[in-house]
Image (cartoon, grey):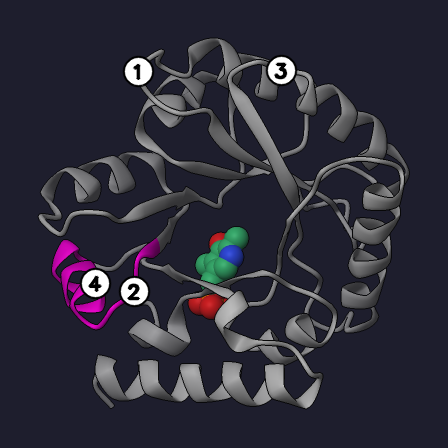
Amino acid sequence: MELPARLSRVQARINAAALACGRNPQALTLIAVSKTQPASAVEQAAGLGLRHFGENYLQEALAKRASVAAAGLTWHFIGPVQSNKTRDLAAGFDWVHGVDRLKIAQRLSDQRPAGLPPLQLCVQVNISGEASKSGVPVDEAADLCRQVAALPRLQLRGLMAIPATDDTPAFARMQALYQRLQAQGLALDTLSMGMSEDLEAAIAHGATHLRIGSAIFGARG
Ligand SMILES: *Cc1c(COP(=O)(O)O)cnc(C)c1O
């Protein structure tokens, strides 16, 4: 199957899942995860109307961004953030989804170039409690969100999670956490969850930003 057909299929899945739970599919943001894909694949996807792209290898992403001619794209960094990478991230991306420590957020804020709008940020939550995974524990998310929201060159937008493959209830726990933080007064509008295999469950539990790679671009080599 070619990219246009795969993309149509993904869009049909998103529409069906949204309608099944009474949500407006137009209100969902599809982030095409283009990691390991060449710049030409991004160009093709942009030609099909996609505007948001997700990457998680910094050097690859910066090179790709520089060689993609299509204008008006929004670039999301979705990988774990190491502190020695924050300067390039702060200069090269519009959004960062994988922040789970205040120190990283502080560096991103300090290093965000003055000429750019604030960096859009999500706090990553380790919702399945996996020792091997990034993300702040659920019971520390509120404190980190409040601290991040106070940083001058960042705009805290919401939460991001990568639930374990067998942990479907994680989507409901993320939705509950997101709503709890909103009720506590945090101005959050982004719940970044849902990948190729689990976008339906994510949409059913309030995801606003879906990060879809292989279902759009095909299996990664
Ligand atoms: C690779 C990746 C995705 C996309 O995964 P697919 O299964 O290819 O859709 C989404 N989010 C993150 C953080 C990723 O690293």
* Residue 129 visible in rendering: no
Q: Position of residue 123 (x, y in %)?
A: 66, 37
Q: Quadrant of the N terminus?
A: bottom left
On screen, residue 175 above or below 103: below
Q: Which residue is mark 4?
A: 46
Q: Which residue is mark 2?
A: 50
Answer whether labels 4 and 2 touch (C-beta < 8 Å): yes
Q: Which mark is residue 151?
A: 3
Q: Position of residue 124 (x, y in %)?
A: 66, 42
Q: Secondary structure at mark 2?
A: loop
Q: Is residue 48 magenta?
A: yes
Identify the magenta region.
38-52
Tell me how far mark 4 sits from mark 1, CA to CA.
25 Å
Q: Which residue type does callout 1 highlight? A: Gly
What residue is rendered at 75% in x and 73% in y? 166
Within 10 Å of disc 3 (Cα), the crowding (few <14, some 14-19, many 20+) is some
Q: Which residue is mark 1?
A: 115
